Image: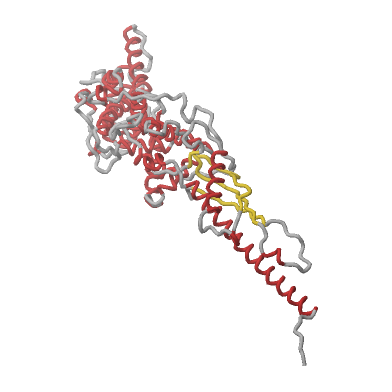
Amino acid sequence: MKVRAGMTVFSAVSFWLIASFLFALLEAGRICCLNTCADMSAALAVESVCAEYQPGLWEEYHLLGLDGAYGGPEFSADYVTAVLRERTQKNIKAEGAGGGVSELSLTAAGLVDYRIMTDGYGSVFLKCVSDYMKENLPVEAAQILYDRYNGETAVEEEGKLEGSVEHAQNAIDEARRQQDAGTPDGKGESAAAGAAGNPNADPLSDSQGQTAAAKEPAENPLEVALAWKRNTLLGMVMQDLSALSTKSIRLEDSVGRRRLMEGTMREMPEISWYDKILTLEYAGKYFSDCQTTESGHALAYELEYILCGKPSDRENLEGTVQRLLLLREAANVVHILSDSTKMQETLAVANLLAGFTGNPGIVQLVQIGVIAAWAYVESILDIRALLEGNKIALIKRKDQWTSSLEHLSDVSGKENAAKDCGDGFTYQDYLKGFLFAMDNQKLSFRMMDLMEKNLSLLPGYQNVRFDHLICEMECRISFAAEPLFWRFVVVSAPAMKEHEFMTEKHFSYYR
């Protein structure tokens, strides 16, 4: 008997259904694979773009940022987009990237949001700096520095006097003129007698009995201090003015004076005290001062520029020394006020200088002037010591005090300086304390000024600008792929358009 082989309609339909199901599964698996390929290609493209960070900034200052101007004078997000598209296209077309079953085509790529280093009035820059320094300074060590810098501010407030050397000397001169004219101030001799009977009275707290015999002291500390003040401050504290740096820069195009490019990210980082301390430690590490000058930099006294913001090294050093003088005067006043022996000395001198007036108020004013004069002379010696590389304690102990009230003029020579305080602060420590009290915007902008000026001196970096440096970005990249296995799904298969894949990637140079 002859048997014919054949396929029934049911078998054929079953085969088509099974085949369509298998092809649908294959297409679904392919879509998952394509999605993974799209994500990997996008991540690789973004990292490839950001790997082209500004090399000079890293080599000189160990900070990372993508130059949105690519070495040119103008910033544009379109430059970054063009590079992103080019890198993405190269990734998906590269050998071994998939092809065939995993073939993708790029449909769109661009920046969604980005952040520039100058954003947030410099807070972004400070965050980048502090992030780099976090591995170098633990919180416990930073807390010690925080307390020290806050101590400087407290001392300045505590050491303020209601009077000055000039006021005291003017009061004495006016009293002498009145005496010579025969018009005494009318306080009588009883006040003078009271002072003679209570030579230890403190005129800052007791107005009783503050005059004495009209005997002149061997040396008038007010006149000594006024004579010192008539000299230039740098001339008083520097051994050789001819050795000062003559470098200067133009400030017209500085970060704080030009119109800055802005990123599109609106949320800005907050700067904590820890971030500020880390920034100051970074500044001490990467910027010079008058004791540690660097060749090849636009300015020699860089920390002084950050503090004062003047165009020349000399102006910045003058401003820094003046600021240092104010702090040391206040600190030395605090020391004198806390030392009963020194207070008795100042009272005795005040009585000798102003006792002839019979006016306790004038004696009190003169004592304040004597305290200020003594503190001023000691402060000049302190600054000399600091500029020579020695340490000076914020508040000195008795054994760390240098000058004598009876012989202030004996230390006028430039070779004289205050005693070194082994547990004290260095010149740079004091500068960091001043910078800690600065406004964050000024601090960050002036640091960026110096970096720009220094980098522009290197070949190929003439156009470097911190408002061109992207430090964080959000990118969106879209891909498409033609259906492959779906075309074999023939049973009630709807028409399928191309597959679309969109991925967003975030990249930041700091945490």
Residue lying at 65% horizontally and 68% vertically, measured from the top left = 26
Look at the picture and state if 128 lies above or below 103: above
Towards the viewer: 325 or 280: 280
In the rendered image, residue 384, in percent from the top left (x then y), is placed at 25, 30
Towards the viewer: 479 or 460: 479
In the rendered image, residue 219, in percent from the top left (x then y), is placed at 22, 21
**From the viewer's perspective, is 410 left or right of 197?**
left
Quarter holding the N terminus is: bottom right
Q: Quadrant of residue 464?
A: top left
Towards the viewer: 213 or 45: 45
Q: Quadrant of residue 211?
A: top left
In the rendered image, residue 268, in percent from the top left (x then y), is placed at 55, 43
Is residue 326 visible from the viewing direction of this image?
A: no
Residue lying at 27% horizontally and 32% vertically, measured from the top left = 387
**From the viewer's perspective, is 382 left or right of 35?**
left
Look at the picture and state if 317 lies above or below 272: above
Is residue 242 visible from the viewing direction of this image?
A: yes
Q: Quadrant of residue 463?
A: top left
Residue lying at 59% horizontally and 42% vertically, measured from the top left = 266
